[in-house]
Amino acid sequence: MYPSLNNPKKRPRVAHHHLHHLLSATASRLTSSVGDSFPDKTLYEPSQKLRRSSSSSAINISSANDTETNSSFNDPSTADVVLRLFVGLSPFDSSTESDPNDHSDVQIYLHSHVLTRSKYFAAHLSDRWQHQRNNNGNVSPDSGSNHLIHLNLPVPDHPNSISIHLTVIELLYSGDYATVIDSASTALEILPVALELLFEDCVKSCVRFLEAVPWTDEVEKRVLSLVPFLREEESKELLARVSPAKDDSCEEMLDGLIFAAIHNHSNMAFVKAFVAKLLREFSSRESARCVLERAFETSLRTMKESLEEYSSPDFTRGDHNETEAIQRLNLHNAMTNGKHLLWLVERMIELRVADSAVTEWSEQAALTADLQRAFQDDAWRNIVPGLPAVVLRCTCKLADAVSTGTILAARQVRKKLVKDWLPVLNVCKNKVSPMLPSHKSLYLELEQTFLRIISTLPISDAQELLQQCLSFSTRNVEDCPHLITAFNTWFRRAAQPPQLEKLQ
């Protein structure tokens, strides 16, 4: 779960020891050498571990150098603070002699008025904290070093951990975030240290950089691991990239993609193929069902309205030219939405979510009546000659899915699907000429499919529908084996003695 974006309260900075665990897991790619830059390396005994403060209030700092403007990083001549960075050893680590070239323990010379830009250091350099530490004997001013304050900062035992801390501390001096933070990986290495030291300007710069650049999958995981340590206003934009603002974002995206695929692109075939791939691979079955059913209903409604207007007697009155223009528009709308329906039906069958589409298609008595009236005249031939094939292909796709069991349709749905659409097939066979080879194969495929569905119905229903299939016959009786087989099956079953009486 991602942190809530709706909580108006600020998320406080987390405890120092939590970020130590986080720093251990942060992959480091900073390659700058530490030893050459800090020759005055001195070892000191570890002091008590300092803890971060979540307070945002100003802290009074006692420093003689508050007004200095020429302080530079690691300058022993002007420093009033000596900071020791060291890698904390686990109690399970073996004790060995220190390697003089080992950079796991570094001493640097700093300035209190610069360090107080970090709230972490500001707390440790405050009058009250220093007074308490001196009383406890933890820090004693070095009389030979102009009363230097000695601080110890343990860092995680991780490659380049000290180098990253030095980089962040140097940013307290330079403030050159744009130069140092030049990649997402660098920002992710610096950000945990900036959070640990409560270096707010550096935190903001890292977050701002991460907000603006692309992420790899690995970077995204690391960003999300840091989100719990950020305040709400800092994490809001980061989370907005990976966390949807509402639950139906996927459906909205799929709605938009389907609409664009069937309406808005000139190279429609390529776009449709790509959207089909997205539907297969990146959507849940229920999301695909919802968006495809909505698109199916919209296109079907538009096609029905267009054909209803085209077949209406009212359009035979009035100005002839105006009527012809409207009729052309109605036929074009019907053809366009028929093509949309064919693509949607193919996607629904492919994803096995066409149940509602089959039921809806079987309840189109008005539409099939309008189609029969439209195909009775010749006006459509020069306007949308492909309309019969498009409509019958939709019917054939759905009927085939029913006959093969891809879609399990109820008996009444199967019966109505054949009963309402069989007359359209008959009209197309009788009225649409010349018959193209592609049309002939389509008609034959739909005939065979209807006969298979009829064979699944009770004998009385099959008897009614088979009588309407006589148009499937050909001049040579032997050329229609599918029809012969269907009637042979029906007569064989009808000749059987009744079985239902035996069950009573």
Image (tube, rainbow, N blue to C red):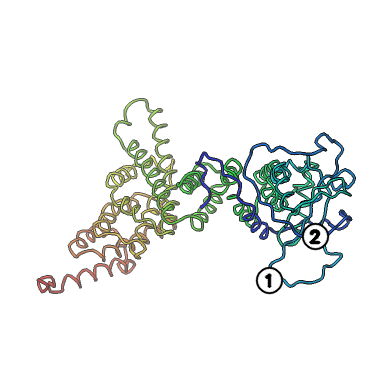
Q: Label 2, secondary structure: give it.
A: strand
Residue closest to the eye, 426 or 140: 140
Using residue 39 as the reference point, say whether residue 184 is left or right of it.
left
Using residue 237 as the reference point, say whether residue 62 is left or right of it.
right
The crowding category of the residue bearing disc 2, from other C-alpha atoms within 10 Å (few below 14, some 14 to 19, many at least 20), is: some
**Residue 255, above or below 49:** above
Q: Mark 1 to mark 2: distance in Å?
A: 19 Å
**Residue 176, above or below 21:** above
Q: Are marks 1 and 2 in contact (CB under 8 Å)?
A: no
Residue ID at (30%, 59%): 409
Q: Label 1, secondary structure: give it.
A: loop
Using residue 186 as the reference point, say whether residue 372 is left or right of it.
left
x and y percent of residue 235 in the render?
59, 45
Disc 1 residue type?
A: Phe
Residue 470 appears in the figure: no
- What residue does disc 1 label? 92
x and y percent of residue 437 in the render?
44, 58
Residue closest to the eye, 308 or 136: 136
Residue ID at (70%, 44%): 199
Residue ID at (43%, 57%): 285
Q: Quadrant of the C terminus?
A: bottom left
Residue closest to the eye, 430 or 49: 49
Checking the image for residue 228, the label placed there is none
Residue at the front extreme of this rendering? 135
Mark toward the start of the polypeptide (1 vs 2): 1
Disc 2 residue type?
A: Asp
- What residue does disc 2 label? 105
x and y percent of residue 434 in the render?
41, 51
